[in-house]
Amino acid sequence: MHDRYPEDEGRRIKGKNVFLHACRCTKYKVNHYWINQARHIHATSALCKYDILHFCYNLIVYNLFYLNLNLGEIREVVVPPFAESVSEGDVRWEKKVGDQVKEDDVLCEIETDKASTFFDKFFTSVPVPSPGPGVIKELFVKDGDTVKPGQKLCTIDIGATGGAAAAPAEKTPQPSAAAPAKESKPVATPPPPTPSSAAPPVSRPAAPIPPPAAEPPPPQAPTASMPVAAIKHAQSLEGAKVQLPPADYTREIIGTRTEQRVKMNRMRLRIAERLKDAQNTNAMLTTFNEIDMSRIIEFRKTHQESFTKKYGIKLGFMSPFVAASAYALKDQPVVNAVIDGTDIVYRDYVDISVAVATPKGLVVPVLRSIENKNFAEIEIALAALGEKARKGKITVEDMDGGTFTISNGGVFGSLLGTPIINPPQSAILGMHAVFDRPIAVKGEVKIRPMMYVALTYDHRLIDGREAVMFLRKIKDAVEDPRIILAGL
């Protein structure tokens, strides 16, 4: 029997009702509130220990039941809303059916393109995160399919573990124990009759026994004749190995004479459209020059250690070329302009796009307001953009705008090339690899590290004189950066 106090019976019943109400609640915050209320009533009432234990037991049971309701929930994942100017995108799956995912893991990315100023378009990728931990049960769209906002992508079994259920192993029939073969006993043949058991001889003389006739030989099976060419072909087939098509046609060719047709992703489509539009719209012309890299190489060797120690990054070749391009653009503002319909748009700023090759394709992030930046500021900005490009985090804002582009094919060993204008710009500078070549220096032949540079420009806006002077200004600024400081 539990101790009871009649004078506290009312408060005891009230406290018990509070306990029971807390047991029926399924949300933690509500439980927390009612637990505090129960503690307050318990402090002012005489409750038996049985009531308290009963309350705790019911509370645990109800909470476990509530949690189990969430386990095994099949949740649908839909396409998130896009930006205002985007209506559809292409799916690129990162996971497959049966994969174990955690909350906020990227299930897929939706490649979209966003319209910007003039006729330019930019590529962006929208990640689709997992709503919770579980296992992917079903995919409603294939890799590369075009989807719209709100469309179902997949379902996830929330709380499931272990990945895809392994297919039940087919039961291989066990070979039945063969019954031991009974040894066949040779049939006993009666022995030949002995002379004693033979019939008694007849009185008349026996007739001579003729010799047995020779048995005819058994007929031979007809031999099939095979041509020599067929024999060689059969031998070649026996020695041939069965080759399967490559798992990834983009990485290897093994000679199976098969083909694979793959849908072009949205980014590659936009790149193709923009490059073709540039050829069809601009009157492109390319001029060339060569740069002696001796002084800038010596400058890097001299100051590389102190530069790296101060800024944490190395001094490369891009910062001198970016600074030289900004210096030349200020000298020839028409190269920084662009044609828009029947108007010419002149810009009072220098934003230089730097072409960067990524696994997804070519992207051109923009360095802003380069006209007044030094080598260190340019290298820091380049390092930040390069890190974002390698991680696939380049955004539309990073690629929006740009008044001039620099493409460095020299990192791949290119000796010479003609770059294509990046619309809506009017010119692009192509850098190439540095090779030692003999050149004439003050009447003498010397070996110097040389680089070819190419400037492709829109001849509708930029005349040959301005283009040649612009490229010459870049050459002088790279060969001797002191002219930038002197303003020569």
Image (spheres, rainbow, N blue to C red):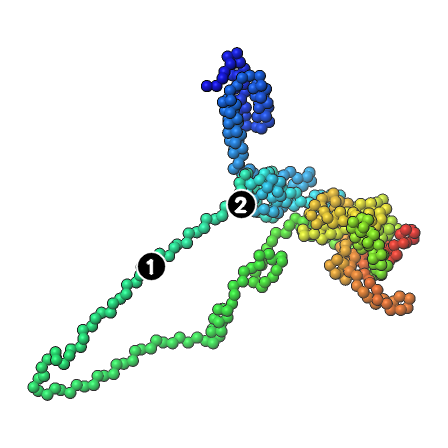
- What amino acid type should be assigned to the residue bearing mark 2? Gly
Name the spot of residue 89 as percent of width and height, x first.
Answer: 64, 44
Q: Quadrant of residue 446?
A: bottom right
Residue drawn at (77%, 54%) of the image: 407
Depth check: give the residue in front, 122 or 306. 306
User: In 3D space, how far apart are the residues under numbered discs 2 and 1 (Cα atoms)?
Assistant: 42 Å
State whether residue 334 appears in this view: no
Q: Secondary structure at mark 2?
A: loop
83 over 206 or under it: above or below? above
Q: Identify the residue at the far top of this view.
A: 7
Q: Nearer the viewer, mark 2 or mark 1?
A: 1
357 over 71 or under it: above or below? below
State whether residue 212 appears in this view: yes
Query: Alpha-carbon neighbours of circle 2 within 10 Å: few (<14), some, or many (≥20)?
Result: some
Name the spot of residue 318 as percent of width and height, x first.
Answer: 80, 53
Depth check: give the residue in front, 25 or 168. 25
Q: Which residue is mark 1?
A: 178
- What amino acid type should be assigned to the residue bearing mark 1? Ala
Q: Which residue is mark 2?
A: 163
420 over 35 or under it: above or below? below
Depth check: give the residue in front, 21 or 344. 21
Name the spot of residue 248 as percent of width and height, x first.
Answer: 60, 56
Residue drawn at (67%, 41%) of the image: 86
Q: Secondary structure at mark 1?
A: loop
Residue drawn at (77%, 53%) of the image: 421
